[in-house]
Structures are given as C-alpha cells and as structure tokens.
Amino acid sequence: MARQYRVNDRITSAQVRVIGEDGSQLGVMTVAQAIRLAQDAEVDLVEVAPNSEPPVCRLLDYGKLRYLTAKKDRESRKGQKSTELREVRFRPNIGSHDLESKTRKVRELILDGSKVKLTVRFRGREAAHQQLGLAVLKRVADDLRDEVRLEKPPALEGRALSMILLPTPQKPERTDQKPEVEDQESEETDQNVEATDQKPKAAATKPKATAKKPKTTDQPKTTDQKVEEPADAKA
C-alpha cells in the first residue's frame, strides 16, 4: 500500500521545517508561509516527516512523488507472487477416465505455479477402505513425479484423505552451457599439442645445414700449396 502524505492545507501543525526542491534548508516557519513558498515555486508543500519536532515538509511535485512511490512499490512486489492453494477432489472408486481428466487438471494448476491439494472424500462405509484413497493419491503423484514435489504427505482429515503438491523449482539455464566451454578448451589444448609436435621437426632440419660446413674447411690446404710455389721458383 502506498504511503499517505499530508499536503498543503491538510498539514495541521502550526510550524514546520521546510526543505527546498534542491534539498536546501529553508528554516522553520508557519504553514501559511511555507504554502506561499510552494505556490511561488509552482509545487506542493508535502509533509515528509510528521513525527519530527517540528514536522518536516518539502517543496516538491506531489503528483510526481505519488508516481515514484507507486513505481517503487510495484518493483518491490515484483517476483513475490504468492502461491495460491487450489484443491482437486477425487472419489476413492474413481474411474480411470475421470482419474486421467483430473490428473490433467492438477498438471495445469501446477504449471500455472499453484500449490494443489488433492483430496479423496469418503462416504458411509467407504471410510473403511482408506487404502483405495491412498492408491488414488499415489497414482496421481506418480504420473506427475517429474513436475511436482511433495509438500504434505497423505494424511487423514476427518472423512477425507489429502496431500499437497508443489511445482518443482526450475533449473537455471546457464548450467547447460558449460560443456560447450569445456569442448572449446579441449580444442585449444589439442591445437597447442599439435603446435608443440611440429617444433621438433623444424629443429631437426637444422643439423642438415650445419653438416655442409666441413666441406669448406678443406680449402685452406690449396691455399698453402699456392704460397709454397713461389718459394720453389726462386730456388
């Protein structure tokens, strides 16, 4: 419920402490003076702290305040939907066709987010055969086992046997995306392994290039012979 404020002439205090539109302190004054300030600013005088001494009033647009307050209340109530309790009644000797029809009704209520109370009522001598009612409740619970969870187990209430079912909480969707991330990581690791396997091949080609160097070292012998030939010619 939205908070109620006293506005303008409905303020009953003789004096009030006034706060301007920009939050500035305008001081303590009579209500009549404060209302004149509000009229000059084309806004309202709103009592925001009635329990203070003196009460605190503020210059603001009351229509805008009501809108913002109602919006805040809606946001606070958002996602707080109360679970409604619905009841579906059965007979202990119910036929298979009627049982399937009522089971579908229970499923619709569960999918709508409601709690469902299943009640089997006994008449006359039927109360002596409570196992029939228990079998009916068990049959419905088994048919809906993937969609409901048990809040209250079967219990006898006077001449009726009842239990309460709740919708199962939904699983978050983000958990389904984890295997894809793991697959990508495994692909990256496979690529890293392939890259490391190729490095030794490149290193193995280097010794072939170094093996050619000893051939060039044989050339100094020919240079020594050329140096000795001029010495023999002089002799």
Image (spheres, rainbow, N blue to C red):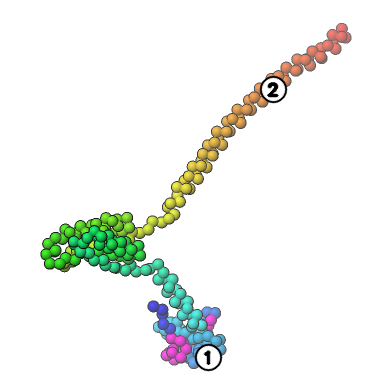
- x and y percentages locating residue 58 in the rendered image: 49, 83
Q: Magenta includes 10?
A: yes
Count neighbours of disc 1 (C-alpha within 10 A) and say few if under 14, some if 14 to 19, many if 20 or more: some
The quarter of the displayed image where residue 172 is located: bottom left
Q: Amino acid at mark 1?
A: Arg
- Whether residue 164 can be seen here: no
Question: Range of the magenta residues?
Answer: 6-21
Q: Magenta includes 30?
A: no
Give the answer, above or below, for where 227 lies relative to 57. Answer: above
Residue name at image x 24 percent, y 57 percent? 139
Circle number at residue 136: none
Residue name at image x 79 percent, y 16 percent? 223
- x and y percentages locating residue 116 in the rendered image: 28, 65
Left or right, 192 with reference to 97: right
Q: Nearer the viewer, residue 15 or 215?
A: 215
Gap between marks 2 and 1 measured at Cα: 105 Å
Give the answer, above or below, for where 12 lies relative to 80. Answer: below
Give the answer, above or below, for where 190 lies relative to 24. Answer: above
The quarter of the displayed image where residue 111 is located: bottom left
Q: Which residue is mark 1?
A: 36
Q: Which residue is mark 2?
A: 213
Residue name at image x 45 percent, y 84 percent? 47
